[in-house]
Amino acid sequence: MLQELWFIFPEILLVLAVIVIILAGLIMPRRLEHQTGWLAALSLFGALLVTVGHVQNGLSIEVFRKMIVIDSWTLYFKLLFEIAGFLIVLFSLGSKETRGQNQSEYYGLLLSIIIGLMFMASASDLIMVVLAMELVGILSYLLVAFDKTSPRASEAALKYLIYGATATGIMLFGMTYLYGLTGTTNLFVIAQMLSRGGTGFTLTIVMLFILVGFGFKVALAPMHMWCPDVYEGAPTPITAFLSVGPKAAGLALLIRFFFTLFTQPHLEGAYTLITGFRWPELIAVISAFTMTIGNLSALTQQNVKRMLAYSSIAHAGYMLMGIVVVNAAGLQAVLFYLAVYLFMNVGAFMVVAAVRDGIGSEEIDAYRGLGKRMPFAPIMLAIFLFSLTGLPPLSGFIGKFYLFFAVINEGIYWLVTIAIINTVISLYYYARIVKAMFFDEPVSPGPVPVTPLQIAVTVLTVVPTILLGVYWAPLIRFVEQSVRFLI
């Protein structure tokens, strides 16, 4: 058992960092407490190096009595969470919204959520699934309400808590029936039991209940209603993190769950459905519904953070397209899109935070004429928004190309048609912000300051957003290796 600890050493490293950060917060003067953020960044960088070592060793092992599995799929998402966490910590250090009291608690909670996300991606047992999801959920509620002086943040956290508790309860209800049907909590053993058939309609109802919990994490329609209020009310760095971290972990868990339980590898890169539960058709309908609701709702928003919240819902719908095709090409498209989505979406929120710090507003009307008052930030935001739209030569275009191609290759033309229409719709509300920044007259004169740290962190996200649009071969090779979790 002790030798198995090495396989979760990144998580152990972050746990130790949380303890040190909390203790440092008790000892350090309040005016220096924000420096614990640098310790959080250092610990995430160290965890990233350990995970890279695991990737190079090609790990594929079940540990702790098969409660978790460390394989190429898990390691890909661990890297994703560590990179996202590192960027968010740097983002937080430069943001006025998270500078204040209880800095050590803030960074301790953030690292703890990342630990939960790692266990979500590696969970291979129903008990571990629930524990990891609850660890992420409960701590997320606290971070959303981190600004105790903001009624908007408190309201958002309460809504998040109510929706989260309801979704978790429904999911647990379904999992208890799944346990009753199979007599085990291990996903791989459950798969063997289900392959014998005989569960029929009951299994369909059970999986619908479980899908509610996964859908809440990914913000799939109709489980998305918490998203706009929470994204608007939470501090912008936390909003950026919630838009990427839990969404990616939810997708990782959803894919492992459905592919482990209901498919078997058939040919190289292909899977065969092993039960009568036709879940790909259900996921396709949810995908179309999610992207349409997200984009149409974003059209009428006047607050940039709410607009990006609905945008993130739409992008969740796009990513579901890669699951519908039930093959390796679709999964590769999902992983690739998650990587580029990380940089372009976090980068967009970083610019929104910098603008809010400078002008004190998140309303689109306040963005008028910003191109003349602070040229750097509007140019960066335009790049991120056009990448989110899927325009070449940016990485968002390549991500959507892989998703659309995977769906077209399987002949699901109705779904890709809906996705293309939604992409055109998204161009309107993204371009509306660009128009306000560069073609409208400024609402007030004078330059708007941007800190060096905000510039540096924005550059860290804009470079891969551009680079992965012109040279993406290394990432796609890594993605191809990472989808072999069932073979």
Image (cartoon, grey):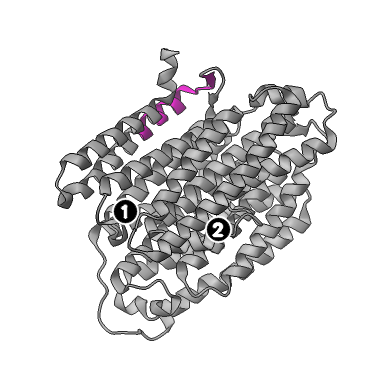
Measured along the vertical axis of the image, is residue 288 above or below residue 449?
above
Q: Is residue 162 left or right of residue 86?
A: right
Q: Residue at x 59, y 43 (%)?
A: 168
Count of labels in the image: 2
Identify the disc placed on residue 92: 1
Magenta-drawn segment: 47-63
Q: What secondary structure prevails in the magenta region?
A: helix
> Gap between marks 1 and 2, in whole Å?
23 Å
Quadrant assignment, res 181: top right
Which residue matches tag 2? 226
Does 58 appear in magenta? yes
Please provide percent x and percent y for residue 247. Answer: 53, 48
Residue 295 shown in magenta: no
| Residue at figure coordinates x 77%, y 27% from the top left | 194
Residue 429 lies left or right of residue 369; in this view the side is right
Q: Which amino acid does label 1 sit on?
A: Ser
Vertical relation: 134 (above or below) 393: above
Horizontal and vertical percent position of residue 7: 44, 22
- The residue sitting at 61% across, 66% down in the picture is 295
**Disc 1 and disc 2 in contact, CB within 8 angstroms:** no
184 w.r.t. 471: above or below: above
Secondary structure found at label 2 = loop
Crowdedness of circle 2 by 10 Å Cα count: few (<14), some, many (20+)? many
Q: Which amino acid does label 2 sit on?
A: Trp
